[in-house]
Image: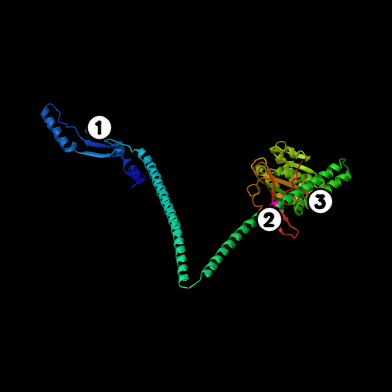
Amino acid sequence: MKIEAVITGLLLGVSICSSLYLGQSEYPYRLVGIKFCPQTSNKFPRYGKEFSKKSQQKLDKKYCAFEYKLLKQVWQKKQFETNKPLPNSSLIIRELPFTESNHLYFILAPISAGAALLSWAKKAEKDELSAHNELEKYKTSIKLSTTDNQQERDFKTGVINQTWDDKKIVYGLTSIDAIKEEYERKKELIVKHHKSTLKQFDLANSSADKHISENLVDKHKADKEIEKLQNKNLSQPNINQSSDKQLVNTLIEALKSHEDGWLYSIIKNAKPLWLIGSQGSGKTNTAGAIALIRKYCFDAPIYQLIDRHATGENWEVWKLLDATSKAESEEEIGQSLEDATDRWLQRIKEKPSTKQQIIIDEFTNLKKIDSCKDAAMKFFSMHLTDTRKAKEYFIGVNHYFTNESTVEGTFEARKSGTIQLKKFSANGETPLSRVQIVHGLVDENGNELEEVERTLPNWLEAN
């Protein structure tokens, strides 16, 4: 028997004894022993001392020889309630020894049981590991024996076939040419199988080379687009109305020509746009670039910027937007959210002809701030429909777009009423050109694009 099993049995015994026996006491209650020993009244001198002594002995023999045991509390209650209590001189009261229960044993019981469980678990773990090792050894031995037997069978088969071929030749059942022809056919099959395997390797290599070439072609096209834009800017240093228009047209054409114009469709779309992704994926930079394109190409100035880090790490991007209103502190953000919802309602009533933009960053954290929570919930619910009616382009930046990070109960509205674009980062610092259209955009046939992979042009930078 293993040592763990012995320890388990010992600890279980200790726990049972501790809970059933060791914690008990011999006298758990306070008891008293009562003897009734009345004093003789024959103490007058005329009777003599000897007569008084015999009278007392007779009384003691009759009454004092018996002791009654009862609860101390009961005895005291009886004495208190009786009208004529017995005098203490006629009573002998003896308190029996009182012993309290030892509670330490009741603490020891669960500790011992827990230690026994751990010991048994250790034993079971060792048994399982031992069984696993035995099984692995058995499997290894089977593999070794199988390999050796297979080699032996192959050798014996070859010897038997060779001997059989020799016998068939001797007895004229076949000819040497026939045997050679059979061996040649087998050799030809082996050679064809080898060539087929080489072709499969060549096919895999050529497929990889094809993907590399396609990537190089895409990179070359992107470089050409950047060079074309740079040449346009260098050839027209003097900015005027006609040159601005030409630059806008050039930028729009570049957007339309990039991967079937999906990026142009998103920028022109009036649906609320949400950029999601992990840290370092370049969400803020992309949001700033899209906002600038909408500002200069679609006449939509940035009216409101809401970001707790507006003048911090995001300032290098946000300063390029020249927003009319900025909200950074908690009080400013709460007031700005309320102002935005009121403004949308007013613009909808007025049926505006001009466009403007609103940008909000890190919406998830706003739900956790008491001064902004209610305004943020109302803001999110209303932006799903009111921004389009009020002719306000909306750009939101967030790490996620779940119920917890937005507002519960708006899943269907979020899916049908917003565009969600997911960005990626390779190491948490360097953004990738890879993006994913999660939902909200359709192709030229009206089919919903969901989790479709695309890329951003490397010239799409806010600066």
- Residue toward you, 182 or 223: 182
Question: N-terminal of the two: label 3 or label 2?
Answer: 3
Q: Amino acid at mark 2?
A: Glu
Task: Quadrant for the C terminus, please.
Answer: top right
Q: What residue is pinned by disc 2?
A: 450
Query: Tag 1, which secondary structure?
Result: helix
Identify the amino acid type marked 3.
Answer: Glu
Give the quarter of the image for residue 328.
Answer: top right
Q: Is residue 313 visible?
A: yes
Give the image quarter of residue 399.
top right
- Magenta segment, which residues? 206-212
Quick check: marks 2 and 1 in contact, CB under 8 Å?
A: no
Which label lies toward us, 2 or 1? 2
Q: How far is disc 2 from disc 1 in space, using C-alphas?
A: 100 Å
Question: Residue 88, which numbered label?
Answer: 1
On residue 53, which mark appears?
none
Residue depicted at 22% across the width and 36% down the height = 35
| Mark 1 or mark 3, earlier in chain | 1
- Residue type at mark 1: give it: Asn
**How far is disc 3 from disc 2 in space, using C-alphas?**
25 Å
